[in-house]
Amino acid sequence: MKSDRELKEENQGAKLDMGLLEIGEGQEKVGKGIVRAVCVSDVRGVEKHAVPEGHFLVDFGIEGDAHRGSWHRQVSLLSYDKVLAFNQKGADVGDGAFGENLVVEGIDFSALPVGTRLAAGTVILEMTQIGKECHSHCAIYQRMGECIMPREGVFAKVIKGGIIRPGDKMEVSAPILERPFTAAVIVLSDKGASGERKDESGLKAKKMLEGAGYQVEELLLLPDEPKLLKVQLIRLADSRQVDLVLTSGGTGFSLRDQTPEATLAVAERNAPGIAEYIRYRSMELTSRAMLGRGVSVIRKKTLIVNLPGSPKAVEESLGFILEPLEHGLKILRGSASECARRQLTDKIGWEN
């Protein structure tokens, strides 16, 4: 059986050709800190233990760590300053107690946007998620009544492999404005979620997005349950910070069709023109398009658009809006990046 290193070295050559390895062109340094601890565990769900150094593998994580793998939560990071403040309340926790891989002093990770690059030792990481839903309260929560990892911890993927040791400096660079847009697709279907029907609508949307240059982070298939949809919309906008979320299905007159209501419940701002344009153009094809109840809204810096449920309607609707969406997404991303850059400079207090 091949080792972790052998498995990842097979793909590393391809990663090296993607131009993703260096912090520099198009990225502004916005902060710095010091790595206080590197922690791993070979079993999930337990505290990690400190090690002298971590061997980071491209698009895989830390060699020997239970959370390694080709997914977006390869490495977890937590601010040493946040842990120190928590311990002053009487928590008395050590490095790795929250399941974090890297403990870093001087950086408020929860204030950084997804897409931020972190360079330490010979490694470059890219942040992929802020915070984490706590499904079962840990021993720390049971003792203290709270846990800082769900709100203060962040996750990253390995862009450049190498070694990080305690004492290494970590540099923070703002996300590149011209990076590909990120997206997620959620299909709402009782039959699809139960396995009675194959999903074609979500796959159609994913293919069209990727053809337009989007990086599709997730494709989800859910039953027509508003509570489940709201949870995922909040997570994708707040934690994963994707640029665009498309939903498919649940926009008709059936009592189970609650997608617009769930979407409006998590919205912070309305963007009605997109949904209106989809209906307007669709009515050129069929008068039944007037029965569509889909909405389009903004939550934080994420645009959420409801599409119909059939593969054909998804292809038509997305085809109407895909090109003009780019301008709106650029505005959302640009304002987010400028705001984040100002906040980081103020919070970290560091200048070039």
Image (cartoon, rainbow, N blue to C red):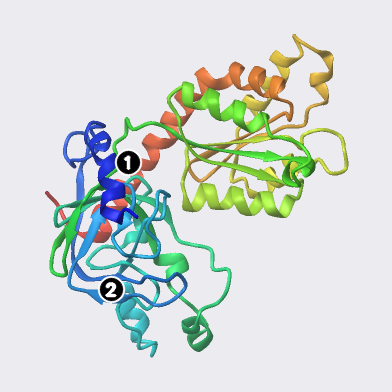
Query: Which image quadrant is residue 330 in?
Result: top left
Mark 2 closeness class: few <14, some 14–19, many ≥20 residues within 10 Å: some
Q: Residue at x 47, y 67 (%)?
A: 150
Q: Residue at x 28, y 73 (%)?
A: 81
Q: Is residue 319 depicted above or below 22 in this figure?
A: above
Front label number (2 vs 1): 2
Left or right: residue 134 versus residue 113 is right
Query: What kind of element bears circle 2?
Result: helix
Query: Which image quadrant is residue 320 in?
Result: top right
Q: Residue furthest front?
A: 1
Report x, y in % for residue 129.
42, 53
Left or right: residue 141 versus residue 52 is right
Q: Which mark is residue 81?
A: 2
Please, what is the three-letter code of the amino acid marked with disc 2?
A: Asp
Q: Is residue 163 depicted above or below 161 in this figure?
A: below
- State the residue position of label 1: 338
Q: Is residue 305 depicted above or below 83 in this figure?
A: above
Mark 1 closeness class: few <14, some 14–19, many ≥20 residues within 10 Å: few
In space, the residues marked 2 and 1 are separated at their CA atoms by: 25 Å
Where does the N terminus fall, quadrant-wise?
bottom left
Give whichever of discs 2 and 1 has the lower sequence position.
2
Report x, y in % for residue 332.
44, 35
Left or right: residue 229 versus residue 184 is right
Please, what is the three-letter code of the amino acid marked with disc 1?
A: Glu
Q: Residue at x 60, y 32 (%)?
A: 271
186 or 297, which is in the foreground?
Answer: 186
192 or 289, which is in the foreground?
Answer: 192
